[in-house]
Image (cartoon, rainbow, N blue to C red):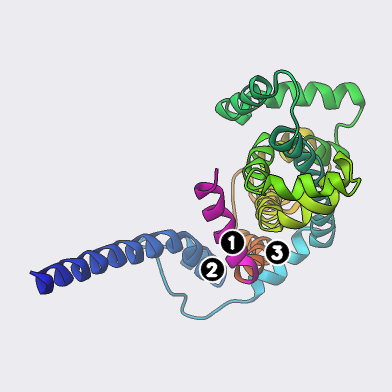
Amino acid sequence: MRATGVRTKNRTKLIIHALLIVGAVLMMIPFVWMLLTSFKSLTESTHVPPVIIPKSFNFDNYSKAMVSLPFKTFYFNTVITTVAKTIGQLFFCSLAAYAFARLSFPGRNILFILCLSVLMVPGQVFIIPQYMIMKQLGWIDSLQALIVPGLFSVFGTFLLRQFFMTIPRELEEAAKLDGCHYIGIYWRVIIPLAKPGLVALAIFTILWSWNDLLWPIIVNTSMDKMPLSAGLAYLQGEHFTNFPVLMAGSILAVWPMILMFLFFQRYFIEGIALTGTKQ
């Protein structure tokens, strides 16, 4: 009976691993296709049936992409907006999460539920109100229009609140006995103990900001105010698109995110796991 149970357990593990490998391969196909296309000639990229492996790897597509677009400006705009949004999210979301997790005030739970209800609304619904606010402020076609709407998020508040609630109350009480006030407890006790949550939120914000496409296209029109994600749209012609050059530009845009994931994947996975298991 025991041997049968072990064989069943091993067979289940084998099936799960096989399914995970198939899923991983399917997820990798678009990126591998993009990478291979960036080395193809224009004829190979539009050939029927499709050419999977190029006959010769053409690196000129990368130089053409660099010449066609101001990548330095795009990188600068993307880095500035990403860093500003990440710092803003960590600061404002942690303050809101601290209030919801550790402070007692009338209507706290109702207010938190109202905040969570925002997550149920599709983000596209907020585009027109945000655009009107940016227009009233005179920030259309500017970097602050890209940064300010992303300084705070309900998701970030919810994520950090879950971490803050796991910190023992005894530490907070001990800090109060030592004369620490609410801001001191937030800065000296809560923030240092919530580093995994802060790192997870920072990674999520960086990924979201770096890949954001819709909002920059709506709010900005000048090429020198565009981030990488939106600037790549200039490589797509109205009647003709050089797909190998477009794919080369896409590779140039995503390689920093790939490096970041490779270096910080442990924090990324830990953040997701802790958010789902802790109360």
* Picture coordinates of residue 76, whole percent (x, y): 84, 57
Rendered image quadrant of residue 183: top right
Front residue of this view, candidates 46 and 228 = 228
By secondary structure, the bulk of the magenta-drawn segment is best described as helix
The reply to whether residue 86 is visible in this rendering is: no
Residue 185 image position (x, y, % from top left): 83, 46
Identify the residue under disc 2: 35
Tell me the SS state at disc 1.
helix
Circles 1 and 2 in contact, beta carbons < 8 Å: yes
Q: Nearer the viewer, residue 265 or 238?
A: 265
Q: Amino acid at mark 1?
A: Met
The CA span between labels 1 and 2 is 7 Å
Characterize the local packing of mark 3: few (<14), some (14-19) or many (20 or more) Cα atoms within 10 angstroms: many
- Which numbered disc, 3 or 1, marks the residue that appears first in the sequence? 3
Residue identifier under label 3: 65
- 14 on left or right of 7: right
Q: Residue 107: percent from the left, percent from the top? A: 70, 18
| Vertical placement of residue 12 versus 274, above or below | below
The residue stretch that appears in magenta: 263-279
Vertical placement of residue 13 versus 157, above or below? below
Question: Residue 65: x percent and y percent?
Answer: 70, 64
Q: Nearer the viewer, residue 76 or 181?
A: 181
Q: Of the residues under marks 3 and 2, which one precedes in the sequence?
A: 2
Query: In the rendered image, which residue does mark 1 sit on?
Result: 247
Secondary structure state at the residue bearing disc 2: helix
